[in-house]
Amino acid sequence: MQHEAHAHHHTADTMTGAMTGATWSTAVQATLHCLTGCAIGEVLGMVIGTALGWGNVATTVLAIVLAFFFGYSLTLRGVLKAGVGFRTAFQVALAADTLSIAVMELIDNGVIVLWPEAMDADLGDLLFWGSLAISLVIVFVVTTPVNKWTIGRGKGHAVVHQYHH
């Protein structure tokens, strides 16, 4: 029933197998959802690694792991609330968010690495927070079209929609 109620938003194109209805609004919502989890993990990882005096590689790895963890967790939580078993919910979260999170992490960490002195900034430095904030804005701009493309093909965040409502 839930899938039928949501079907008016995404109808299959029988000629291409692609989904129609992948609006920019849907892509923006999916990106913001994914970015929320990624940002929580990314910021937490950077703060923990920097506060503990870890090197750049260890801090970056921690931030990436936490970004995936929190990104998947937010989707997992929503799908589990719909009454889906954990294994299925986990598979949905992986299918929904992996590409989006990977693109986000590639762009975010790429910006930080390429930004002069950003990797060496301390928690009290404006450069630390400014470069992180700007990298997340760039992530949003780059990832939204990726999510629109995947949703339009019935992939990515589109797989979560059958569990909404």
Image (cartoon, rainbow, N blue to C red):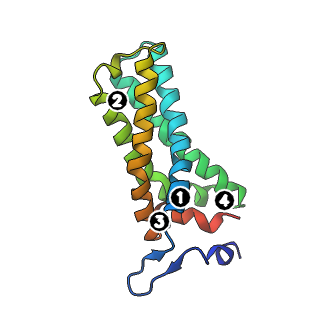
Q: Amino acid at mark 2?
A: Ile
Write down the quadrant of residue 36 in the picture: top right
Q: Amino acid at mark 1?
A: Gln
Q: Which mark is residue 112?
A: 2
Q: Amino acid at mark 3?
A: Ile
Q: Could you say which disc has been placed on residue 85 in the image? A: 4
Sequence-wise, the earlier of marks 1 and 3 is 1
User: Residue drawn at (31%, 36%), measured in percent from left and top?
Assistant: 110
Q: Which residue is mark 1?
A: 91
Residue 136 on image: x %, y %: 44, 38
For the question of whether residue 158 can be seen, the reply is yes
Farthest bottom residue in view:
15
Quarter the C terminus occupies:
bottom right
Residue 128's disc is none
Q: Residues within 10 Å of mark 3 (few under 14, many from 20)?
A: many
User: Pointer 4 and pointer 3: residues touching (CB < 8 Å)?
Assistant: no
The residues bearing labels 1 and 2 have C-alpha atoms spaced at a distance of 31 Å
Q: Amino acid at mark 4?
A: Gly
In the rendered view, tell whether residue 148 sits above or below residue 111: below
Q: Percent x, y for residue 109?
A: 35, 34
User: Which residue matches tag 3?
Assistant: 151
Going from N to C along the chain, the mark reached first, 4 or 3, is: 4
Counting other residues with Cα less than 10 Å from the Cα at mark 4, is it few (<14), some (14-19), or many (20 or more)? few
Mark 4 or 2, closer to the camera: 2
Question: In front: 21, or 163?
Answer: 21
The secondary structure type at the circle numbered 3 is: helix
Q: Estimate how packed mark 2 is, as few (under 14), some (14 to 19) or many (20 or more) residues with alpha carbons within 10 Å.
A: some
Residue 57, placed above or below residue 164: above
